[in-house]
Image (cartoon, grey):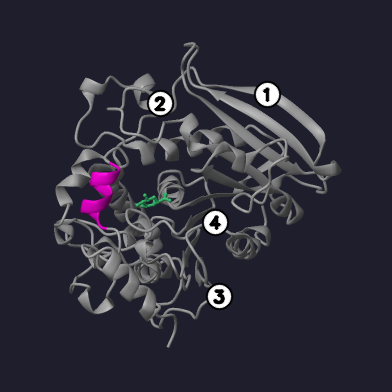
Amino acid sequence: MGWQANKELVETLSSKQPGVNYREERVPNYVLPDILSLANGKIVRSAADWPARRQEILELFREHVYGRSPAAPAGMRFETVEIDPKAMNGAATLKRINIHFSEQADAPVLRLVMFVPNQRTAPAPAFLLICNRGVENIDYTRKIKSDFWPAERIVERGYVAAAFFNGDIDPDKHDGFVNGIHGLLERPEARTPSSWGTLAAWAWGAARVMDYWVTDPDVDDTRCVVTGHSRGGKTALWAGAEDTRFAMAVSNESGCGGAALSRRCYGETLSIINKAMPHWFCSRFHDYNGREEALPLDQHLLVALMAPRAVYISSADQDLWADPRGEFLAAQAATPAYALFGRKGLGSAGAMPDLNTPLLGDGVAYHVREGSHTYSLYDWDCHMDMADRELKLKPS
Ligand code: GTR
């Protein structure tokens, strides 16, 4: 039968938050926009025709959801701040790289932290965490360790453990897009309803890390994974969509505006998120508050933008706010895009997997684990299991 939301939890949350729907039976009927139908009515039938449809979908997300991001500034430069070959008791080489976007004194600087496994004979595959929690979670001294970024484990499993703090690119508050990378690259008065929001800015930061990685011989730039939790997970999906150099994207409990289908209006909705976080998306997205059926897209198309590359969507059973079922359904609904490439995705039939039972499909993976809203070691291990299958075995 597969995972079902815990009834008591549904009751508790429904009474605590009467304006929020947690009941499956109250999910409205909806029809999802078709993945394979081009705007001109033609149907995509082969991988060769996918790029045209992919471009249309990408433009829809730029125009209506995340906004349009600029190219990397001409003056971007990479500064090596520290290299310590004896980090983690000799298991890794710590590399701290600052990515500068301008010579202006107060310009934002992306401070990339990397632990490169020392035990390897070739460039290593990498996991990049877009860290949306305190910088202590990505402590390069390793005095503070947290499961949110289990760097030792990532290294042990043969991956570069990399991370940057999202606030380095853009502070997570609504400031009228005056400071952060928006302020540096664009005049606030030049903004349009489709100008990039804060999630797009963070995703842009991940792409700049990729710009650096193609220059770093320690990293196998054909096997890089972008990952994030919650707002970081929304960002990771958008980063993977915008930058196809990422071989895999991971969304951990990203929910509304991430992996969850907006049309289900289950847990967090567009009205709620756009009111609480007016800076996350482009301002045109706000036009769809309470009018989800009018959206020319839904989030299954975001997952489909990863095809035929790998994508992992994970949920937690207590995190109904992020709509685990809506996240699963989006991942499953992306199947036709994978099928164009002879990949099975999650498969189009079938219920949700049981609790703590990862479904590692062909290109697409999903799990719902027990517990609350966080990035846990269990999640990381599952994500790396999928990456092992999808990336490590692939000849590079
Ligand atoms: C909440 C928001 C969610 C999720 C979460 C987080 O405030 O409603 O969409 O992103 O923050 O990032 O932990």
Q: What residue sits right under mark 3 in the picture?
A: 356
User: In the rendered structure, which disc, 1 or 2, sits on the residue that comes first in sequence?
Assistant: 1
Which of the two discs, 2 and 3, labels the residue nearer the N terminus? 2
Residue under numbered circle 1? 80
Local secondary structure at mark 4: loop
For badge 3, the amino acid type reads Asn
The amino acid pointed to by label 2 is Ile
Label 3 vs label 1: CA separation? Answer: 41 Å
Query: Cα distance, mark 4 to mark 3?
Result: 14 Å
Q: CA distance from mark 2 to mark 3?
A: 39 Å
Q: Which residue is mark 2?
A: 181
**Gap in angstroms between the C-alphas marked 2 and 4:** 26 Å
Residue 116: x %, y % from top left: 73, 42
- Do tag 1 and tag 2 residues touch (Cβ < 8 Å)? no
Locate residue 51, reporting x and y percent.
36, 53
Labels 1 and 4: the sequence-earlier one: 1
Range of magenta residues? 269-277
Residue found 43% across the figure and 79% down from its top: 352
